[in-house]
């Protein structure tokens, strides 16, 4: 895994412009991978045809992850859509970021880990956990209670388990 941070660039591949956004490490302050830095860096990119994300994160800040997810779902869709590659891990609130992409790809050795999000305010904690579970349940066509159960058990799903449950689209 690379050290914490974020990088974004446009790469010309054949006749397409790919926006490549690499996200590694903890999300939120004091990490270099926070929502404000993400949005600022992303907005500095020129027009592109495909959005390609690379994600390896244990999570960290549910509010930053939420803001990044909302930003990604709110931008104009690129001509050929978006995809994210989970290279090692996607845990806790980082799942919100992965779910903001059209397609989720995983390396064979990567995993998605569900954890309960913790807040000092119990109502905020409950809402945040419901939000993550709802987004996952909607994507995979599951019941909210099942995903909340995964969170309570700190369930760690391999790439193959994610593919079988439709949480990822392909293993590459």
Image (cartoon, rainbow, N blue to C red):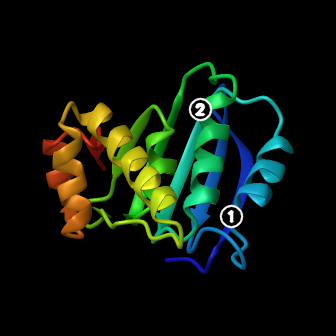
Question: Which quadrant of the structure image shows residue 11?
Answer: top right
The residue labelled by disc 1 is 6
Distance from label 2 to label 1 (Cα)? Answer: 19 Å
- N-terminal of the pair, mark 2 or mark 1, is 1
Q: How many marks?
A: 2
| Secondary structure state at the residue bearing disc 2 | helix
Determine whether 84 is above or below 152 in the image.
above
Q: Residue at x 46, y 53 (%)?
A: 128
Determine whether 162 is above or below 88 in the image.
above
Q: Nearer the viewer, residue 138 or 52?
A: 138
Q: Is residue 75 left or right of residue 59?
A: right
Determine whether 63 is above or below 139 in the image.
below
The residue labelled by disc 2 is 73
Question: Which quadrant of the structure image shows residue 52?
Answer: top right
Q: Position of residue 90 (x, y in %)?
A: 40, 62
Q: Residue at x 20, y 59 (%)?
A: 150
Residues at marks 2 and 1 touching, judged by CB atoms closer than 8 Å? no
Single out the residue that lies furthest toward the top: 79
The label on residue 24 is none
Q: Nearer the viewer, residue 75 or 54?
A: 75
Q: Position of residue 92 (x, y in %)?
A: 40, 64
Q: Residue at x 24, y 41 (%)?
A: 144
Q: Is residue 144 left or right of residue 5?
A: left
Determine whether 4 is above or below 8 in the image.
below
Q: Residues within 10 Å of mark 2 (few under 14, many from 20)?
A: some
Q: Residue at x 40, y 56 (%)?
A: 126
Q: Residues within 10 Å of mark 1 (few under 14, many from 20)?
A: many
Nearer the observer, disc 2 or disc 1? 2
Q: Position of residue 15 (x, y in %)?
A: 66, 25
């Amino acid at each position: 895994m690379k050290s914490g941070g974020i990088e974004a660039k446009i790469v010309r591949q054949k006749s397409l412009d790919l926006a490549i956004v690499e996200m590694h490490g903890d999300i939120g302050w004091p990490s270099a991978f926070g929502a404000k830095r993400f949005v600022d860096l992303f907005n500095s990119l020129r027009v592109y045809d495909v959005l390609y994300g690379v994600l390896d994160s244990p999570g960290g800040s549910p509010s930053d992850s939420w803001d990044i997810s909302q930003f990604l779902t709110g931008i104009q869709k690129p001509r050929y859509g978006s995809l994210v590659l989970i290279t090692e891990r996607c845990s806790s609130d980082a799942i919100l970021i992965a779910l903001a992409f059209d397609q989720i790809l995983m390396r064979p050795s990567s995993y998605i880990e569900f954890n309960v999000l913790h807040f000092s305010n119990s109502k905020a904690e409950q809402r945040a956990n419901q939000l993550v579970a709802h987004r996952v349940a909607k994507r995979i066509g599951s019941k909210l209670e099942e995903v909340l159960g995964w969170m309570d058990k700190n369930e760690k799903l391999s790439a193959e388990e994610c593919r079988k449950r439709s949480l990822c689209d392909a293993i590459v």
